[in-house]
Image (cartoon, helix red, strand yellow):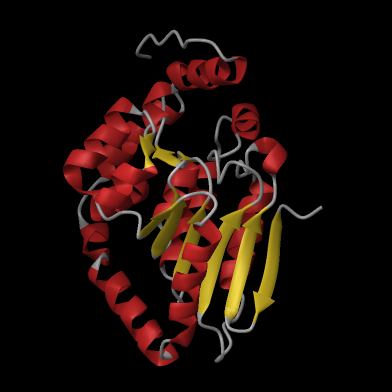
């Protein structure tokens, strides 16, 4: 069974994460399927891409079991490729978040242009709790959409925030009860599908280009710090503790 379901209805392409038994964790196959879908040629009649998920959880982030076996080798760069193709996709991308979006799931949602979320959903980055740190690319997106104060809360504490708080801050475009989520999402999707296609593509390109200035800021030293955390004994301990559902014993090395 495919871990990414692709369906096209008129001008709307829907990509559905289909690993509900794994809380839609992003393994290599799933990330590759999403990259392939977003790199597919865009037809003149296409207007919008929708990202959603089966099951109660939107996405729990990168697959921890898979990453624990590989010590994360190559996983981050492959995931960043996915987020880049979402962010730079010529069409508006809407995330319909019915449940928790944690770590990579949080970034997946935030790299979409608009988020429609259930008021029962939570968003967060738990990396500090397992001995990891986000790359420059991932942290940059948080700063763009959340600002420094909320970025500090999300990253340094690592606890998930309710969708209602993100909605109040403007990160979530529409908030709805679980029962009304699909109706609220349909309003956004239908509006985008009815708008002028050339206007949508030009506006998306304008936004992306104007936000790319942070890419040029020197950050080699920060990247080395992130890499040191990734290969540390603490990271190995943090992942093991999370999988074993116990408290991590970090030693700062």
Depth check: give the residue in front, 131 or 104: 104
Quarter-of-image position of residue 46 = bottom right
Q: Position of residue 244 (x, y in %)?
A: 61, 14
Which residue is drawn at the image coordinates 51% and 50% (left, top)? 79
Q: Is residue 78 above or below residue 125?
A: below
Does residue 140 appear in this view? no
Q: Is residue 176 above or below residue 26?
A: below
Instruction: Using the image as rendered, state which of residue 25 and residue 238 is in the foreground.
Output: 25
| Quadrant that contains the C terminus | top left
Left or right: residue 115 versus residue 152 is right
Left or right: residue 219 versus residue 62 is: left
Q: Position of residue 208 (x, y in %)?
A: 32, 70
On the picture, is 83 further left or further right than 153?
right
The x, y position of residue 120, in whole percent, is: 46, 41
- Depicted 56 relative to depicted 212: above or below: above
The answer to whether residue 31 is visible is yes
Q: Is residue 173 above or below residue 138?
A: below
Q: Kindly identify the residue that appears in the image at 55 percent across and 52 percent down.
A: 179
Q: Is residue 53 left or right of residue 101?
A: right
Q: Residue furthest right?
A: 1
Task: Return the residue found at the far left.
Answer: 149
Please tell me which residue is depicted at 61% across the width and 37% down the height of the picture: 63
At 64% from the left and 58% from the top, the residue drawn is: 16
| Tally of marks | 0
Q: Where in the figure is residue 77, as x and y percent of width and height?
A: 49, 49
């Amino acid at each position: 069974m495919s871990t990414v379901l692709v369906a096209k209805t008129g001008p709307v392409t829907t990509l559905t994460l289909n690993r509900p038994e794994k809380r839609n964790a992003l393994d290599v196959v799933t990330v590759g399927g999403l990259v392939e879908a977003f790199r597919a040629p865009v037809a003149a009649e296409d207007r919008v891409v929708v990202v959603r998920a089966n099951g109660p959880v939107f996405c729990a982030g990168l697959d921890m079991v898979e990453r624990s076996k590989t010590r994360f080798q190559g996983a981050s760069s492959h995931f960043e490729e996915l987020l880049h193709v979402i962010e730079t996709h010529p069409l508006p991308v809407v995330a319909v978040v019915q449940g928790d979006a944690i770590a990579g799931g949080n970034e997946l949602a935030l790299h979409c242009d608009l988020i429609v979320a259930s008021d029962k959903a939570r968003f967060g980055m738990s990396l500090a709790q397992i001995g990891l740190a986000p790359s420059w690319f991932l942290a940059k997106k948080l700063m763009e959409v959340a600002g420094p104060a909320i970025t500090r809360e999300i990253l340094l504490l690592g606890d998930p925030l309710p969708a209602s708080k993100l909605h109040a801050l403007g990160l979530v475009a529409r908030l709805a009860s679980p029962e009304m989520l699909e109706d609220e999402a349909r309003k956004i999707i239908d509006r985008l599908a009815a708008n002028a296609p050339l206007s949508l593509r030009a506006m998306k390109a304008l936004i992306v280009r104007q936000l790319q200035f942070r890419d040029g800021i020197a950050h080699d030293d920060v990247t080395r710090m992130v890499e040191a955390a990734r290969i540390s004994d603490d990271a190995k301990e943090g992942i093991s503790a999370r999988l074993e559902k116990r408290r991590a014993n970090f030693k700062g090395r």
